[in-house]
Every structure is written in structure tokens, then in C-alpha cells.
Image (cartoon, helix red, strand yellow):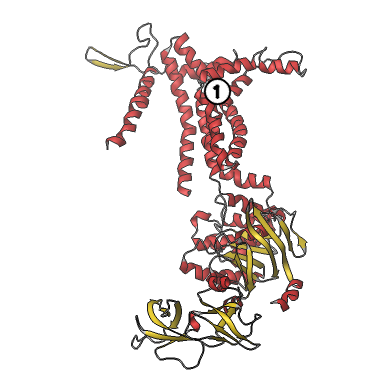
Amino acid sequence: MTVIGIPFIWLLLFLVFPFAIVFKISFAEMAIARPPFTALFAFAEEKLSIALNLGNYLFLLKDHLYVAAYLSSLKTAAGATCLALLVGYPIAYGMARAHPGLRNLLLLGIVLPSWTSFLLRIYAWIGILKTNGLINNLLLKLGIIDTPLHMLHTDFAVYIGIVYAYLPFMVLPLYTNLVKLDESYLEAAADLGAKPWKTFLFVTLPLSKGGIIAGSMLVFIPAVGEFVIPALLGGPDTLMIGKILWEEFFNNRDWPVASAVAIVMLVLLIIPMMWFHKHQSEEMETA
Amino acid sequence: MTESATDEASEAYIRIRGVTKKFDAITAVDNVDLNIRKGEILALLGASGCGKTTLLRLLAGFEIPTDGQIAIDGEDMHSIQPYNRPVNMMFQSYALFPHMNVAKNIAFGLKQDRLSRADIKTRVNELLELVHMKSLFNRFPHQLSGGQRQRVALARSLAKSPKLLLLDEPMAALDKKLREQMQLEVVNIIESVGVTCVMVTHDQEEAMTMATRISVMHDGKILQTGTPHKVYEYPNCRRTAEFIGTVNIFSGTVIENSSDHVIINAPELDREIYVDHGISGAAGTTVWVAVRPEKMVISTTPPTGNYNHARGKVEEIAYVGGLSVYHIKTPNDVAIRATLANVDRLAKNRITWDDEVYLSWQPSAAVVLTW
């Protein structure tokens, strides 16, 4: 009984409780005080007054910046997820079709980079992408370009960073799915006259749907709220909600608005997560 | 069999010539020659690892022969990919696509041929009718029973009207009761379509029930090919005799060999063995005599005649309903099996444990084997 309870206590302490605090702050008003927001509940003269300030949420809706930041975050995350899928699928497919003895080594190769610091790895991309960085120097030396390309501090660099950082989260669920794919389905398709690419399109791809969805969710969800990658690789035009959140908290010290930003983001992310969950339970039923 | 060899070659629809398949150091199929006639059901029968599945996969095109040639309807198959062969296979696991319903599974092969939507629909309906699955056309494989899945798999492999249908252990996924029913049903469907069929099985009863001819395989080679009756009653070697059904085998040396009989001295038995056919072997050759258990006559009184006797004690009786299998041990410790049909329901006067009994058989009941 106590063992079963542990995950719930964990969730209560580290998810529900902090969420409740953030949720509460999002209804407060900014104040020059410590903590820097007004209290929700006041008890004076035998009256309990609850001051729910909806202004923060209305502010988010009215201010064009926030709406644009949300949309741009969703767009960037979706784009990066698609790119990660395009890059990750062939890798996962190759690994699943590799000799069984080689598979674990390849798997290690995918996971190994995550053993160094995330920050360090993103920072390293600056050296690769900057004006006199690795890529530009190489291209100049080869005579392919005359003037260095402007890559760092652009949305392009943000995409590269997200795809690079979250690729293992795409590859691993795809690999676990594809490695279980029964070879006899592929043989049956070939036997029935399907050329290899058709077999892939009509058999392999639909049967790996679960892996595609799982991998995409694992990349998309953290990518929406990503802060480090746009901060280091993105430019002044890169609008992402993670960055806005940071600025609200630390530059503006507007905790209530920052909390509202966080809550809205959470709601936005819960939708795809619930869809994912529903799909998974459907998958369980059919299996 | 030699007299029919030229006949066979001329009517061969599928011709397998000197086919060998090696996987690294292992030779899975070893120089196999086989002619398959149009419209017949040929069973490749053998224990696991005998190369029967590899031979089937060579026909399907999933493996390329290391050596030799496979021709279907006069066309060499060597460089033809599986997806271009006029061959369809029913997989052991059925390999029905789990994300497609029954109708879509059956239509899959037809879609690859770019038939019109209407033509596909007509053909799918024909097949659904053929395998009695019309009402379940929109079910998914996981919603079907084992027997239903098999019907869909059969319909799918027949959809493109292949020149050759391959069945890989067709009954392996079914339980015993359903197996017997499906064996006959599958044969009926295949015969009604008239497709040439090669099946792989390790179950000799299944091979005998379903096939018009059986090829017994061992160690990558075909030992004997013939009708079920022929391989059972006239096995050409000890391994075939032992693999198909049960058999008593006595070794001995030829004493007398003429065109209409052989007399063999079998040290394990009381009397010499007399067989009513000649063999190609001089006196003194070592041979083996095979006698099926159902051809043994058990009695409590000594049989008359000078040949084909044995004497022993009943060690074990296996009562299997229709039959009783007697395990009899001779004084010099040779185990002999004899079966007796239980035609009488009463159990009295029946031979029982530890009885001293005599065994005998007709001169025509035994087969002399030379290897």
C-alpha cells in the first residue's frame, strides 16, 4: 500500500503543489513587496475577501506579443518535431534493421551525447554556426561561398539546436517500435506484389504509428517551452514563450503575469498530451 | 519410380533442378531435384531443420539459390524478385496486416496490380464468398478466431490467382480439433480453385490428409517423393519408413534372393523372414525389413508356417480408443509394436500385460530396405 502511494506523494509534492502555487500567483497583482505580488485572501473586519485578478490573463490575450510568442513557439516546436522525425526515422529504421549484435552499440551511440551537459552541447553549436565558425570556414576554404553565411542567432539555428538536442527522444521510441515489427509482414507485402517503397509506405509506416506519435510528443512538448536553445542560438527576432517567461520573471519581476504565461502554456500542452494518451490507450486495447 | 521419371519431367509445371542453398557453412538445401505437376498439392515433409522451409522460401523468392535452377511454367525464376513472382504464400503466422480489415487485407495484392476499384471489389467479394467470410469483411485480424484468420490468409494468397500457392505449416497455429476440420476445408478450397500448391509440414498425418504427393526431406535432401499410399506402404529407406507412421525394423542378411521372393536371416527373430518380392542385392547383403504395426498379427497360440514369426511378452498396452498399441518384448530384448483394432466393446479374452504372445505377418506385409 505504501509502495503504491509513493508515486502519488511524489506527484503531489512536486507537481500538484507547485502548480497550485503558480496558479494562485497568476490571479494576483504585481506589488513592490516580498514576495512581489498581492495576496489572494484578505481577512479584515470579520470579512474574508478574495481578490481574483483576471487582468493577467486578459493582458496576455490583449497584448499582441504574447499571442505571437505562443503561436511562434508552437510553430517552431512543430517544425522542429517534423525535422526530427525526418532525421530520426531513417536512423531508427537503420538501427532496427541492423545486425542484432550491432544494435546495442548503435543505441549507445544515440544516447552517449546526452551524458555531457546539455548547456555545453548547445554552446558548442555557437562555435559551429558563427560567422567565423566551423561551417563557414570550411565552405569559404572550399570556395563554395565568398562571404560567410549568417546562421547563428537566426531561427534556423534554433531549429538545428532543437533537432540536435531532442533527436534521441525521437529515435528511441521509434526504434523500440520498429525493432518489434514482424519481418513476416514485410515479406507478406513483397509476396503480394508490393515493391519495397510501397511496403514501407503501406505497411511499415502505418505499423510504426505508435512510435511516431510517442517520439513526436517527446520532442514537441519540451520544445514548446524551450528556453536555453532560443536564448543561446536564437536572434533578437526569435520569439519563444520560454524566453518571454524568463524575461517576465527576472527582468520585469512580474510574477503574476509570468505565472499566467506558464499556466496558459500548460493548458496548450495538455491538449496534445491528452490526445497522445487517448491514442495510447486505444493502442493497448487493440494489442 | 525410374520408369516414370521421364513422364514426370515432361509434365512438370514447376521444375527444381539441382537447387542448393547454403547459409555460411550450413547447407540447408542440398542439390534438390523436384518436379511439381500442375494442380497437385505437394507436401514437403520433414523434421525441423531438414530444409523444407528454406526450399519453400526459395520458391517464394525470399532466398536466392546458391546453385541450381527453379522454373515456374517454363520461366526461370532466378533473377525475379518476390514481388514479381507468380507465387503467393500463406505464412505460418498468417502475417495478416493488423492495421487493415479483412477486405483490405485481401485487396492488398490486387491493389499492387493497379486493378480498377470495381474489379478489386468484385474479386474481394468472390474470395470472401469462397472462404465463407462474407459477413466479417470489416473485422480486423485481432477480432477474428484462429480458423477465421486462416481463411482470410488463404483468401489473400489466392486473390491474385497465383501459378503457385505456398503454405508454410498451414495448421501450426490451430488447435487439434480445428486442425482436422481446416485440413479438409483448405484442401477443398485449393482444389476448387485448381491452383498448384506446395505446402511445408512436419506433421505426417497432415501431409497425408492434404497432399496428393509427399516429398520426405532429411538433411536438405529429398529422400522419397510419392503419393501418401506409396511413401507409407513402399518406403525406399529406413528414414522414410520411420518418419511416416510407426514401423518395426529388423536388420538381417539376405540368404536367398530370387525374382519373386527373398529370404532373410534376422538374428533378432526366431524365424527367418520371407518377403514376396525380389530385391537388387546378392545373398549376404545386409538389409532391413520394415513391418508396420497394423500388419502384425498377435495370437496366444503359435502360428503355423516356417517364416515371419516372433515371440514375446506384452510389456505395455496403449489404449487409444479405436486402437490398442501393444509393446512386445522378445526374449532377446527386441521391442516390437503391434496394433489391434478394438472392434469388440467387451474386454474379455483380450490379450493383456505379461501375456506370452506370438507375432506373425504375411509375406506381402514386409518391405525390404537396402539403406
Residue B212, given in percent of the width and then of the height, sits at 62, 74
Asked if residue A100 shows in the view, the reply is yes
Above or below, comparing residue B28 to residue B315 in the picture: above
Residue A236 picture quarter: top right
Would you say B315 lies left or right of B178 here? left
Residue B180, given in percent of the width and then of the height, sits at 50, 70
Residue that extends furthest to the bottom in the rendered view of this protein? B304
What residue is disc 1 on? A73
Residue A106 picture quarter: top right
At x 36%, y 18%, the residue is: A52
At x 43%, y 9%, the residue is: A253
The quarter of the rendered structure image containing the N terminus of chain B is: bottom right
At x 44%, y 76%, the residue is: B335
Would you say B123 lies left or right of A53 here? right
Picture mark count: 1
Above or below, comparing residue A29 to residue A95 in the picture: above
Above or below, comparing residue B333 to residue B257 in the picture: above
Residue that extends furthest to the front in the rendered view of this protein? B284
Disc 1 crowd rating (10 Å Cα; few below 14, some 14-19, many 20+) is: many
Q: Is mark 1 on a helix, strand or loop?
A: helix
Residue that extends furthest to the top in the rendered view of this protein? A32
At x 41%, y 80%, the residue is: B331
Residue B252, given in percent of the width and then of the height, sits at 55, 79
The quarter of the rendered structure image containing the C terminus of chain B is: bottom right
Residue placed most toward the observer, B92 or B308: B308
Residue placed most toward the observer, B144 or A55: B144
Asked if residue B122 shows in the view, the reply is no
Residue placed most toward the observer, B144 or B40: B40
Residue B73, given in percent of the width and then of the height, sits at 75, 65
**Residue under mark 1: which chain is it in?**
A
Q: Which amino acid does label 1 sit on?
A: Ser
Residue placed most toward the observer, B303 or B257: B257
